[in-house]
Amino acid sequence: MASARGPCGISVRSDFSSACLIHKAGAPSNSVSGVMAVQVHRHRNKVRNGQAIRCAMATGKEQGAISTASSGDQTKGGLRGKLNKVVLAYSGGLDTSVIVPWLRENYGCEVVCFTADVGQGAIELEGLEKKAKASGACQLVVKDLKEEFVSEYIYPCLRAGAVYERKYLLGTSMARPVIAKAMVDVAKEVGADAVAHGCTGKGNDQGDILEDPANEPKEDMYMMSIAPENAPSKPEYLEIGIIAGVPVSINGRDLSPASLLAELNEIGGKHGIGRIDMVENRLVGMKSRGVYETPGGTIMAAAVRELESLTLDRETMQWKDIIALKYAELVYAGRWFDPLRQSFDAFMEKVTATTTGSVTLKLYKGSVNVASRKSPYSLYREDISSFENGEIYNQADAEGFIRLYGLPTRVRAMLEKGI
């Protein structure tokens, strides 16, 4: 199983199970998400028994460029039928390396391997082309999706405040749709008539020490952060600049989305920030224990949330929090392209239009605390909130308000006492 650091701030472990799901051009499908299983610190069982290769049909044909190479005799078809060319989501691990010859044997097709660069780093991509062709692939296509991933997928979730089950910042879930979209684009470019990826009905990433929720994660599991107790004894202050609900700068330096998040990952990891150990409810109904690292995402989420405390009124903030729960659920369930999520996005863009300003955060031994908040659109007025000044806010006005606000309780008490 390949391990890497993704720009979303999680320690990404990307692989595909020994089952294979094929989406064929021309047949109906309700989803193109879930192409890549990006798993985080969930140790898999070493032995997986009884996993059958399963096939299903779906959408996506459009002719494009011609593949640059060909392997073997592809004219006779295979054991399960005939496809001309299949694009396979490819990690270079054992499972996808096995799927390449399996596809050729069963469908008599050329196999184009596709790998998405969502921030794994050069080491994860080294030797992939040689490995893919050694497995029987005719071509390897690598797409750099880092900027698109952060700006078009991570930032909308950040702006929405989407957190699944109180803790999970959806790093894995956000990666799947950007990879799925890019994979379909590649299929069109190379003239493929199907796409394929590893799959399994239950999930194969609950294994080893983390299977027992009573076990503390081992320190050597963590890839991006040091233990909080080993973090620097001196706090570090960061000023995060924000425009319309998304970060744009660190300490006054404007950065691209992917560069900004990568830098926050490094800084946050140094201070032991963003470690999450949770037992989550998975879509298939079972509970699963996972340990995540999200240093950059944790810092960004804290900054945006603190700025919203200045720029959102009470009712808007409450409705935003309510919708954020459903937003997170949709993303977690692989429904990124659902019209409902897109409608939620329109709401989030509207209500965060004035969430602009800067937040200074104090990072210290695993904690992120706010030190300063500033916004030209702040709804906070010192002349109103101050206990020393009564020119605008007359405290005597509170007496009548209290009587009216407590009236329903007073009426109920009168009824119960027969008054």
Image (tube, rainbow, N blue to C red):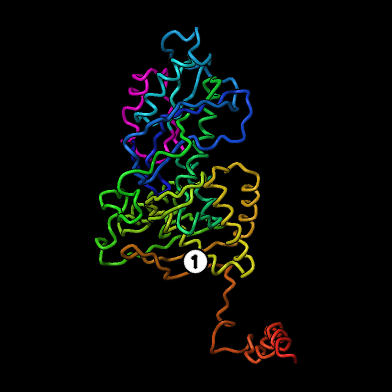
Give above or below for 300 relative to 3: below
Left or right: 414 in relation to 231: right
Tell me, yes or no, whether the highlighted magenta stretch contains residue 117: yes
Pointer 1: what residue?
306
Q: Where is residue 215? Give x, y as percent.
A: 30, 54
Left or right: 372 in relation to 328: left
Quadrant of the frame with the N terminus:
top left
Report the magenta residues as a range: 116-145
> Would residue 120 be visible to someone looking at this image?
yes
Give above or below for 97 relative to 160: above
Q: Where is residue 56? Give x, y as percent.
A: 55, 27
Rendered residue at 25%/49% (across/down):
220
Tell me, yes or no, whether the highlighted magenta stretch contains residue 22: no
Q: Nearer the viewer, residue 361 or 334?
A: 334
> Would residue 90 be visible to someone looking at this image?
no
Q: Nearer the viewer, residue 168 or 217?
A: 217
Please state which amino acid type lies under the numbered disc 1. Glu
Q: Where is residue 82? Give x, y as percent.
A: 53, 14
Give above or below for 154 relative to 413: above
Quadrant of the frame with the C terminus:
bottom right
Q: Where is residue 286? Give x, y as percent.
A: 47, 47
**Count of residue discs:** 1
Callout 1 environment at 10 Å: few (<14), some (14 to 19), or many (20+)?
many
Left or right: 418 in relation to 394: right
Q: SS for tag 1?
A: helix
